[in-house]
Structures are given as C-alpha cells and as structure tokens.
Amino acid sequence: MSTSSAPTRSAIVIGGGIAGLSAAFDLHRAGWRVDIHEAAGLWGGKVQSSPVGDRLVDAGPDTFLARATAGYQMCQDLGLEGELTSPVAPVPAYIARAGRLYPLPTGSMLGVPTDLDALANNGLISAEGVERAKVDLSADATPLVDGDISIGALCRARLGDEITDWLVDPLIGGINASDIDLLSLRAGAPILAAAYDLGPSLVKSLGEMMPSTGPTLGSAKPAQPVFYGLPGGIARIVDGIIAALTAGGAGLHLNSPIASLADAMARADAVVVATPTAAAAHLLEPVSPSAAAELAAIPYSSVAQAVVEIPRSGVERELDASGIMFPRGEGRLITACTWLSSKWAHYHRPDSVLLRLSSGRYGDERNAALTDDELVDALLADLRSVEAVTAEPIARRVKRWTPAFPQYAPGHLARVERILGAVAADAPALRLVGAAYRGIGVPACIDDGRSAAASLVDALG
Ligand SMILES: Cc1cc2nc3c(=O)[nH]c(=O)nc-3n(C[C@H](O)[C@H](O)[C@H](O)COP(=O)(O)OP(=O)(O)OC[C@H]3O[C@@H](n4cnc5c(N)ncnc54)[C@H](O)[C@@H]3O)c2cc1C
C-alpha cells in the first residue's frame, strides 16, 4: 500500500470509525499523506470485537448486507473475501407477541406482507388485521409531504396499525433502534420508497419487486446470501485497514480528539470529518454555522447489549432461527435476542449457546438506569417470558452505545443536501462522512468514506 514517490497532497481524517478509515484507506492508496485522529483508544468506532469468555465476539455489527456491495468490495481489497460467511439459521427470526413466538410470515419484505394468505395462516396478525391490510390493494396513493413521509404514517394508512406495530416496526425500527413513526421513508427504507413510487399498493409493488431486488431482508431463506459475517468479527475489516495504513506509513493517532477544525484545515490540503453529528456540529460551528445547526438537529438512539454464553442444557427450546424480535407493543426492555450461535457457524459450540440480548430504541432509555448486572438480569427475565432459560450465564459482556444510531427524520435526504451544500460553499476541501448522512449500515459507511476520498482526489489531484 505504500507509495513510491513523496506524497503531494495531505489529508487529516477526524474519526477512526469505519467511514473515516475507508476514506483514509483510499486517500492513502491515491498517494496522499494521511493522518487519522481518533478520540478513543481503539480504532473502528462502532465496529469492534471484544472477549466473551475465551473468544472474540462482535460488539457492534456482526453482519452486513450483501446487496450493498461496498462491504464485499472492501473485503476484497483487504484479501478477506474468501473468509466471508453467511448466516446458517434456516428461519430468519421469530416475533414475540403475548408470550408466544411466531416465525416471520413468508413472503414479507421489511415486515410488509406480499402474500396476505400466508400472513393469515401465520397467526401473528389477527383476522381483522389481515382484512385491514386489504385496504392497501385498492386505496388511492398516500400523499407525501415534500416528497417524504414517515414509514409509520405510510404503513398505518395502507396496512393498518396491527401490521405496522407487530411486523414493520420490529423489522425496520429494530434495525436502527428507531421509532418508525418518526423515520423517513426515503432515507430509512429505500426499498419501501421504491415500492411506494411503483405503487400505490405496497403489497403488490413489493410482490412485483421481490424477484428483481435479489435477496431480501425478512423473506424466507433465499438462494443467495443476504448478509455476510466474518469469523473473528467484522472488526477484522478495521484491522485490515489499519494494517495497510501502518505498512504505508500513514499517521495513526489514537486518544487524539480534534478540537479545532480550522487548525486541522490549516495543516492539510483536505479534511474529512467522520464523527457522529454532535462532534461534527461542534467542529463545524466556526467554519460552516448553517451546516452545524442542521447537524445538531439529527437525533440519535442509544442501545445497550448483553452477550451471554449459557450451557446448552440450560436452554430448552431448539434455537432454529437467528433469534427473536420483541415489538415495542410488548412493553419489554428487551428489543431482540439474537441466537448468535445458531445464526453463525463460527459461534457454534456443542455444549453452550451464545445469545445477544439487545435493549434501547428511540424514546426508550430505560437501560441507562440499570447497572450491568441489573441489565443482564432484566434482559434474561424478559427472554424467559418466551423461552425457557434455566441456567445462568457462564460468560457475559455488556456493551453500551451512546450515541448508537442516527435517526433519519422525514426530509432527512433534503437536510443532508443542505448540509453538504453549505459545507461545499464554506469549505470546498472539507468532506463529511459517516452513518448520519446516506446510510447507517457498514457498507453505506464504507461507500460514503470511499466516495469522499474519490471526490477529494478528483478535486485536488
Ligand atoms: C450495536 C450496533 C449494532 C450494529 N449492527 C450493525 C449491523 O449488524 N450491520 C451493519 O451494517 N451496521 C450495523 N450497525 C451500524 C454501523 O455499525 C454504524 O452505523 C457504523 O459503524 C458507523 O460508522 P461511522 O464511521 O459513521 O461512525 P462511528 O463508528 O461512530 O465512528 C466515529 C468515530 O469518531 C470518533 N470521534 C468523535 N469525535 C471525535 C473527535 N473530535 N476527534 C476525533 N475522533 C472523534 C469516535 O470516537 C468514533 O470512533 C450497528 C451499530 C451499532 C451501534
């Protein structure tokens, strides 16, 4: 990765999460002198692995979408593509309702059913709820406001509250720890937005789209991978980037928060700000005040997760899926239980199971009041409402993410355009990248970082 001639351009990257590292990786490959400053003592931001018992387990993302190719592409560039694996669990997930578990209805995409007969047979949604969804088949197009609407408002209008609360919210809201009544259709669920545009019926449009969109989140077991994981953790992508940058002589600065953007801009030809929005807003305030004000208005949810290893004999049911989603309507602290050792072959052991218990969503911060031990106990108690877990954990790890997920409100894409437009006018050699802008997932953040690097190389050479 090292360059043969002396670098002619220099960049400072502020934030060593996956977006900032991806930008640094490509700027460095383009022959630039790159310095990355990370406030924390670890690289990767949300992309981390840490021990649970005697093994490393993903602490943030454990997977990324295959359809968004930037993740695979980065693995290829790092020589990791041969090690990518896919979930092995045969059924995507169960949904908990009133003490019972229901498999995700077949033919649903992001929780929106495309087969109302299959939905009726599934039992999760009442006969009245299924009947209500038929309104979608004939209703006029649902009006938008300035081209966007909340996912909740759209789904409630077309499919009714029951499907929205017990299917769409756990799937789409669950991914980003969001409240779908406050989440942008265009930014939060682009596939649903495409169905709306094809519309007016979401059920029919998604049914038509299903064969052409490739593997889909929330459908029955597809032929191609929907998700990838990496034995040893997704953080191996971070390790790979850091190894390449180290070998090439980039400046890698941990425990090195940047306090002044103007100083950073004076020291390099270009600067990439790759922090969550509170830090980005603070940095931008003196340089681009209108961008800073818009950034500060993007809210975040926080999550806390416990990973527990339990003796196999202490879990009575067969763990034959990737886990359980607990819709908001259940009123529980737990939002999901991922059966990590069923989902991934690399976490499988014959004598124990590995479970990830999640809590926290936008508007629910109850976990913040609990100690780590109280959190594990409360999450296990919630899990026991649907699954007999008779043994105590033999290993455990609690990880709290504050902030965790930026929340894309309706109009988010227009807001991002305004932010980026203001920055382009105020500081042409500055780029903003990361989960707050054009996508929350790992591939979107990689793509954002790499696109920023390409645009700087285009602009400055
Ligand atoms: C629990 C959890 C599970 C997830 N699961 C998945 C998943 O399964 N699949 C998926 O695709 N995505 C998942 N995501 C989302 C994805 O991991 C994140 O959106 C993505 O990693 C964010 O990357 P980023 O680089 O934008 O930001 P971050 O990872 O937040 O990195 C920003 C960095 O900036 C640093 N920083 C802040 N201020 C300063 C400063 N002043 N100076 C220097 N550095 C600073 C921070 O310390 C941080 O390291 C998950 C996220 C979480 C929290």
Image: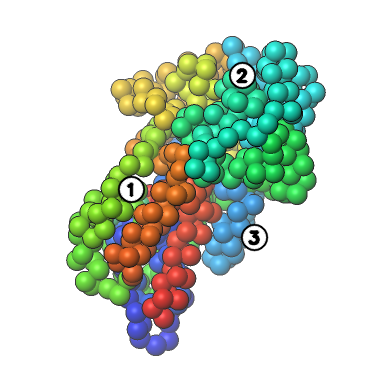
Quadrant the C terminus occupies: bottom left
Q: Is residue 226 visible?
A: yes
What amino acid does circle 1 point to? Leu
Q: Residue at x 50, y 21 (%)?
A: 328
Q: Which mark is residue 295?
A: 1
- Residue 120, above or below 276: above
Q: Secondary structure at mark 1?
A: helix
Q: Identify the residue under disc 2.
A: 162
Query: Quadrant of residue 196 in the image?
Result: top right
Q: Secondary structure at mark 3?
A: helix
Q: x, y (%) of residue 273? A: 33, 59
What amino acid does circle 3 point to? Gly
Q: x, y (%) of residue 184? A: 50, 39
Q: x, y (%) of residue 398? A: 39, 33
Q: Residue at x 61, y 33 (%)?
A: 142
The residue at label 2 has a CB less than 8 Å from ligand 1: no
- 408 or 27: nearer the eye? 408
